[in-house]
Amino acid sequence: MAKQKAPVKKNEKLTLTFEDLTHEGNGVAKVDGYPLFVPYGLPGEEAEVKVVKANKNFGFGKLIEVKQSSDQRVEPPCNVFYKCGGCQLQHMSYDLQLEMKQNQVKNVMKKIAHLDHVPVHPTIGMEDPWRYRNKVQIPVGENDGELITGFYRMRSHEIIKDMETCVIQDELNDRSVHAVRRIANRLGIEAYDEKKDKGVLRHIMVRTGRETNETMIVLITRTEELPYEKELIREMTETFPHVKSIVHNINKQRTNVILGRKTKIIWGEEYIHDTIGDIKFAISPKSFYQINPQQTDMLYQKALDYAQVNNEDTVIDAYCGIGTISLFLAQRAKKVYGIEVVPQAIEDAKKNAQLNGITNVEFHVGQAETVMPEWKRQGLNPDVIVVDPPRKGCEVDFLQAMIDMEPNRIVYVSCNPSTLARDLRILEDGGYETKEVQPVDMFPQTNHVECVALLEKK
């Protein structure tokens, strides 16, 4: 039998009309039913496209020229948007971004969870979807003997040279990075060269408390010593009075992982602080803390609404991190138990409970799928379980442990709609009913979407 060929060839140029968007934000055009995925294409647009790859069942194209533009197309405010790849959606209106994210969730609820009857609400967006990131980790390089900072060019490890600002970063972080670069340049500190595995300064990381304006600067080096440390500290603290903490992190490995294991506070405090709602958090260099606190507040309020917790309820917060959701729940619940596999996060969670005078919460280090069956044997019967797993979703053993504990409600917070849908299917088959899903736009201008889902025992 003859092998079926794609109706298009590599390097062929075509004029096509886009019909839809993928969950990554690429335009979808069809040639005799054969889908072609094209970055930066928008539904309803007619464009000239060059085929860059033609697989058997689908292909990829490059946008050459938009002949008929959508009214949803906007001019990206970032001058390196088409080079960088950190954002994917600056070319589309914010309304379309929110609609695309809602459709992405609806799609996986239908195709993966087989729950297309479950309401997926419109995505909760931001009034001002710019300058929201409270943490930046930016690589350092050299160009003509001068230090440069910037994100990597798409699909490469080459720093974009003409990048002066990032429009989704907090402006304070932007200014702090530039100041550190200027000072380090003047002092003659070398950038790390990853090809030769030589040099000193690898990355600059800046964290800022959105509500407190407290800033932490982390200098990541290949070397044990930070050259001109005293001069750096003096100049940085004189330039920026809001700097509360300067940290030296040592990473000697040839790796893409940014932070090394060894961290020293070289000036100021061990933590900076921020608040979400009325809860205060202490944030260390390695703490996992949501990068968009304004939308995190929206997300957690929705999780609280779904949890319907009162002062008679016992709650388990699995994957509790530094205690962010646990402490919100503890304000209403009788008792909250948090579980997290990272010991440092549990130390931070305990500190945060103390910081807020919250005493009805216990934090435990361990894997939820191991800890929860043990708690059940000891007679712990939670009314509500809240879960906020990493992108890969929940392990099957953990989902079974939740089902076995038989809470009245499960609130599932997810940063990956596909694994959420997969896990909802398992929970449905285990005796739970998904009531509704609320997408929240935590990362405007990118194709990521966060969700919170409510399940009740059938």
Image (cartoon, rainbow, N blue to C red):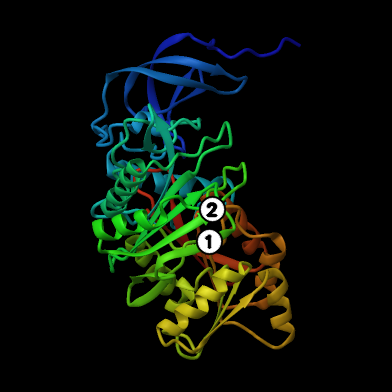
Residue 269 quadrant: bottom left
Q: CA distance from mark 1 to mark 2?
A: 9 Å
Of residues 169 and 303, the one drawn nearer to the viewer in this rendering: 169
- As shown in the figure, which amino acid type bears the numbered disc 1? Thr
Residue 173 percent coordinates (x, y): 32, 52
Residue 437, relative to residue 369: is it above or below? above
Quarter of the N terminus within the rendering? top right
| Mark 2 Cα shell of 10 Å, populated few (<14), some (14-19), many (≥20) | many
Of residues 163 and 396, the one drawn nearer to the viewer in this rendering: 163
Label 1 SS: strand
Name the mark on residue 263: 1
| Mark 1 Cα shell of 10 Å, populated few (<14), some (14-19), many (≥20) | some
Residue 361, relative to residue 114: is it above or below? below
Q: Is disc 1 in contact with disc 2, using a CB cutoff of under 8 Å?
A: yes
Of residues 325 and 30, the one drawn nearer to the viewer in this rendering: 325
**Residue 309 in view here:** no
Quarter of the C terminus within the rendering? bottom right
- As shown in the figure, which amino acid type bears the numbered disc 2? Leu
- Which residue is under mark 2? 259
Residue 285 percent coordinates (x, y): 47, 62
Q: Residue at x 29, y 48 (%)?
A: 179
Of residues 454 and 64, the one drawn nearer to the viewer in this rendering: 64
**Residue 429 in view here:** yes
Q: Residue at x 52, y 51 (%)?
A: 416
Q: Residue at x 32, y 77 (%)?
A: 278
Q: Residue at x 67, y 62 (%)?
A: 429
Residue 251, relative to residue 162: is it above or below? below
